[in-house]
Each structure stands twice: as C-alpha cells, then as structure tokens.
Amino acid sequence: MSNILIQERDVVIPGEALAEGMDFLPGDNTYRDDNKIYSKILGLVNVSGRVLRITPLSGPYVPKIGDKIIGKITDITMSGWRVDTGTAYSAFLNVKDATTRFVKKEEDLSQILAIGDYIVVIIVNVTSQNLIDLTMKEPGLHKITGGRVIHINTQKVPRVIGKQGSMISLIKQKTGCDVTVGQNGLIWVKGQSDNEYRAEQAIKLIEEKAHLEGVTDRVSKFLEENQ
C-alpha cells in the first residue's frame, strides 16, 4: 500500500520521508531508498501527479544556457567586458555580442558600457571551466539606466515571477513600474521613486514569505494599503 507522508508546500529537511510504496516517483532533489522516497535537501514539497519534487529554500544560482540575468560590468578588455553575475562563474560579453553597430578597433569601449554599469543579458554558453558567455543582441536586452537593482535569494525567483508571470504582473499593475527579473536573483525596478520603493518592499515580502500559502493575497493587500 502506498501513502504520501507530507502535503503540498510542506517544508522538509534532508533525509525526511516523503512517501512510502511504489505508486509515487522521486523527482528533483529526492531519492528512493527501499520502499520510501526521501528529501535530499531543505526545501518546499511539490506534488505533481505521482512525482514528488523539492524546491530548495536556499542555495547558489547555477547558470544555464538561455537564462536571462542581470550583471554588472567589472572590467573592460580589448575585445569586450567582464561581468559580475553574482556567481562563482566568470562571465564575458564580447563586443560583437553587445551591439549591432560596427565598433572600430581603437574605439573607447567605456563609451558603450562603463565599469559599474548594470546590463540585462542572456547566457549563450557555459563551459566546463565555469566560464559564461553573454549576449545583448536579443529583444529586451539592454544597459540599465535609472531605477534600482534589488538582490534576492535566487531560489525565490520563481515565486517572484509567479505562475505564468502572475506575481510580477501584479506588482507592475499596482505600482506602474517596469520590472525585469534576472534568474540570478537580481531584479531591476524602474518607476516613480515612491512606487519603486513599494515594488521593492513587495518583492522582499515575497522573498520572506515564499514558503507560505496565500502570498499573492498578502502582496496584493500590501500594495493596496501602501498606495
């Protein structure tokens, strides 16, 4: 006989039993031992049909090809820019991937992107030596001007975005701000200064309460009460 021992969105610890019997299948961050499925990590339970998954509550961002992230220019070389992505990986943006216009060899690259600038980019390659290649030559990618950049726990990014973008749409609607979420936990918010602050506080509320139910209602109420 198979039994599930936990409930959707329960917080579990490493080694905690999630289900017994063969009717359930181990998914991300779980494992089977004999007749039971256990959690590998500290995280949040997700039950999808017969599959049990655990979403980590903490941990570093692991870069993946296709991820949209926000980075900060830290150095300028002859051929491009070194970018801090908030990870242990070294990232590089080549001149040819930064702009569609022709760049002369002797041109001052700091006039395009300067040290300290934040940029919205996409990861196009991750090597076995922990090197990341970036591009800005796709729609929605650009240098950030104005607004504020917020740092959150990377594991909370999916909650900030919400199902089919529902949570981030709520924040945009209630504050009138533009909001860009990087998979590496950096978020850019731009609008009127008081609305930027409201959006930031809403994002921090999501980060803090991500493991609880009813987060959308909490955020909506917060934004309405602080208009």
Image (cartoon, helix red, strand yellow):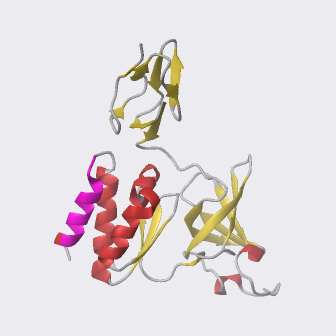
Q: Nearer the viewer, residue 60 or 203?
A: 203
Give me the residue at 35% from left, 37% from top. Answer: 8
Q: Toward which corner of the image does residue 38 lie, by quadrant?
A: top left
Vertical side of 132 occupied by 191: above or below: below
> Does residue 77 appear in this view?
no
Residue 34 in the image, given as x and y percentages of width and height: 52, 12
Q: Nearer the viewer, residue 32 or 41?
A: 32
Q: Toward which corner of the image does residue 75 lie, by quadrant?
A: bottom right
Q: Nearer the viewer, residue 10 or 15?
A: 10
Residue 36 in the image, given as x and y percentages of width and height: 46, 17
* Relative horizontal placement of residue 9, taking residue 65 as reference (left or right): left
Q: For the C terminus, which image quadrant? A: bottom left
Residue 159 in the image, given as x and y percentages of width and height: 40, 54
Looking at the image, which residue sits at the far right?
105
* Relative horizontal placement of residue 77, taking residue 17 as reference (left or right): right
Q: Which residues are magenta?
A: 213-224
Looking at the image, which residue sits at the far left?
225
Q: For the N terminus, which image quadrant? A: top left
* Relative horizontal placement of residue 69, taking residue 126 as reference (left or right): left
Q: Is residue 220 magenta?
A: yes
Q: Toward which corner of the image does residue 7 lie, by quadrant?
A: top left
Q: Is residue 110 magenta?
A: no
Residue 83 in the image, given as x and y percentages of width and height: 62, 66
Vertical side of 214 occupied by 93: above or below: below
The overriding secondary structure of the stretch rendered in magenta is: helix
Vertical side of 179 occupied by 87: above or below: above
Give me the residue at 55% from left, 76% from top. Answer: 117
Give me the residue at 66% from left, 73% from top. Answer: 136
> Does residue 165 appear in this view?
yes
